[in-house]
Amino acid sequence: MDELNLNQRDVFAEWRARLEERVLAPLRGTGWRYYAWLAFLLAVIGWALYAYIQQLENGLIVTNLRDRISWGLYIASFVFFIGISHAGTLLSAILRVTRARWQMSITRMAEFITGVALMVAALFPAIDMGRPDRILNMALFGRWQSPLMWDILAIITYLTGSLIYLYLPLIPDFALCRDRLGPQAPAWQRWLFTTASIGWKGTPAQRQALERAMSIMMIVIIPVAVSVHTVVSWVFAMTLRDPLNSSIFGVFFVAGAIYSGIAAIIILMAVLRWVLHLEEFITKTQFVYLGYLLVALAAIMGYLNISEYITTGYKMEEGIIFYIQELFVGQYAGLFWFYILGGILLPILLVSSRRTRTIKGIIFAAVLVLVAMWIERYLIIVAGFRVPLMAYMPRNYSPSWVEWSILVGGFALFALIISVFAKLFPVVSIWEVVEHRGPEPVEESDAVSNLHGGQGSEKTIKPESKVPQTPMPGVSMTRRETLKIMGGVALGAVVAPALFLDLGRKFASSTSPATTKTNQRLRRWAMVIDLRYCDGCQSVGKPPQCTEACIQGHFAPQPMEWIQVYEPALPGGGTQFVPTPCQQCQNAPCVNVCPVGATFATPEGVVLIDQQRCIGCRLCMEACPYDRRFFNWGQPPVPPEATFMEYDPMHQSPAIKGTVMKCDFCPDMARAGKLPYCAQGCPNKAIYYGDLEEDIATNGAQVVKLSDMLSEDSAYRLKENLGTMPRVYYIPGHGEMVGRDAYKTGRLPTEWPWQEKLKGSVTWTR
């Protein structure tokens, strides 16, 4: 018996020595291949920086984003990287809490993916901003009504918690590196491990403190991780766009995040296993178990897709018909069916089959999943935003070289940080593997059908007490302690945002551009457009004169049409012309989502934009269901005289690159007793402007009682079912009062009244 125990101790000692040698080898020396790899990654990142410098100098005009599809590759990549961050810390925490031990050799890789992916993901919203130089406005003027602010808070919380959760299990391994590397290690390395190990010696008191800290973080990190991608989904689901207006987006995004995150872990695990020669310690068992998790999430994703498309497709609401046709048989059919068949169905078949349930087969399935989930994020954004909101032809989008370069640079940065981490720190948690596994027995032909030979088996050789080892902290919290922690987290999640919100309101009330003192009687401005008299200016043979007058009065940059005349079809045949300014919603989605209060409502109900505060995130554009917001993609072209004007949100001139503009309802002119430019320019006097409080309106030729006009002429508002409460009313018609034939279609294109433009300005198309 003593001889058997001695043999077991010898086997374990030899195995542990090999483990430490393999894991610590990158810390001891570096070959030329490593530096060549870093040089390649730095070159790719350098090219991406060059592309971004071009974007900073010229504006987002260098991308192929435009007003109709104003989010694209950058935001899709942001959602993707946030997604792959999920499975790392979340999966590790769940497996630790459930005491699953097969994952001990890969937990650190999984946890590190979270931190790196979150750091890379956080760059893309800043890259996508029109005015990244104003990013501090989010702290100075941040409004907690905006889902974007929730997103930032959730990501910062998750990143902080994930880095803490990554650091805690590293402490014993830092001490091991401190003791094993010895005096021959560089001074900076000795200092790093000595400092980071914070005097770890494995005493009972230290083990108890580490146990409690890890237990708390395990419990806290799970709900935080779930909340992060739920909040990310709300940035889209809280808009009023048909394809994105879904109540299951939170579940959809969380499941998709874990799905893509597991695939990312499998790929990173395979790469580090091959590069660092960790085949003995990362075996087929880890791949198979992660493959099973991949299949489970694939089934969930399949179920969610079926539920989503059957329910929306069955009802076929406005906008959904176009969206589903585009996905199933239209422009995006190839990408969509690759996502469904190659990203969900094929991975299930690969992992379920005994023949393909190999390491290579599971890696191939993970690659398919990762590519397909990036495509899914791209389709959610681009295909969703391609659905026309009004009566115009849908626009196309394909990323420019600048966008592709920055995306590739993002992946290179992801790989660079991981490469540096693998060089500086142990990528395998040595002390956990030693304590809970010992050497792995020889693997049978199939790790699943012969679990007695796999990791986590009851027959795994346990280390003897005489062999030096670092005990692994267990999850030993009582039920009461767990409930206290969870209650504290929940209380903090409720109280902290409420306090921030209260402080934000107090600060905003003192700095908001809408805060004005006036002794005049409060007005409630409104507009009525009588479509019976609107013929698109066909009778005068000119482009819509309301648009022309608005452009000339506001110096609106080409190609902005703040009041655009659409030509939708009539139910009985033929068409009508519908002038569409900003609808001046009293429950304005754009005001709700703006993270810095640049979009605000005056006491008179007029919605304005302060370009000097706007950060160019374009969330207000995505939230507007009427497509009545415009972005200055490059240096906006304006006439020279506009450059000398003093800027005022009441009259948005001169235009500022990287900011949003729109119809301002001309409140400054109304106070001066004048009609808005559009009403002045209408040759048929179809546009009335008035005050709901005083109950009068005028088109410049006659004065009417506003309430009588709205009730007697069956006035309606656009998309009233959305609850936005617009203050622009329409009287049904198709220009019949001025002799227009409903079947005579077409309007002349808008002409900008000036020829000279500001030096360096550029034009673009919507």
Image (tube, rainbow, N blue to C red):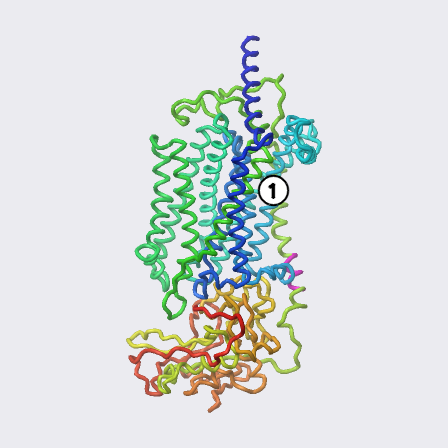
Q: Place residue 522 in its image quadrant.
A: bottom right
Front-most of residues 61 and 261:
61
* In the displayed structure image, the side of residue 42 where residue 306 appears, left or right: left
Q: Is the residue 209 above or below the residue 729 in the image? A: above
Front-most of residues 710 and 445:
445
Q: Is the residue 285 above or below the residue 612 in the image? A: above
* In the displayed structure image, the side of residue 199 where residue 309 appears, left or right: left
- Disc 1 element: helix
Front-most of residues 367 and 457:
367
Q: Dot 1: within a 10 Å radius of its alpha carbon, few (fewer than 14), some, or many (20 or more) residues? A: some
Whether residue 492 is visible to the viewer of this picture, yes or no, is yes
- Image mark count: 1
Where residue 269 appears, as percent x and y from the top left, is 48, 35
Whether residue 209 is visible to the viewer of this picture, yes or no, is no
Of all residues shown, which one is farthest toward the bottom?
A: 701
Where residue 541 appears, as percent x and y from the top left, is 36, 85
Where residue 564 appears, as percent x and y from the top left, is 43, 75
What span is colored magenta in the figure? 499-506
| Quadrant (top left/top right/bottom left/bottom right) for the N terminus | top right
**Mark 1: amino acid:** Leu
Q: Which residue is drawn at the image coordinates 53% and 36% (left, top)?
A: 34
Q: Is the residue 58 above or below the residue 556 in the image? A: above
| Quadrant (top left/top right/bottom left/bottom right) for the C terminus | bottom left
Which residue position is annotated with label 1? 163
Where residue 150 appears, as percent x and y from the top left, is 57, 55
Does the magenta-highlighted stretch encompass residue 637? no
Instruction: State the predominant SS element of the stretch in magenta.
Output: helix
Q: Place residue 247 in its image quadrant.
A: bottom left
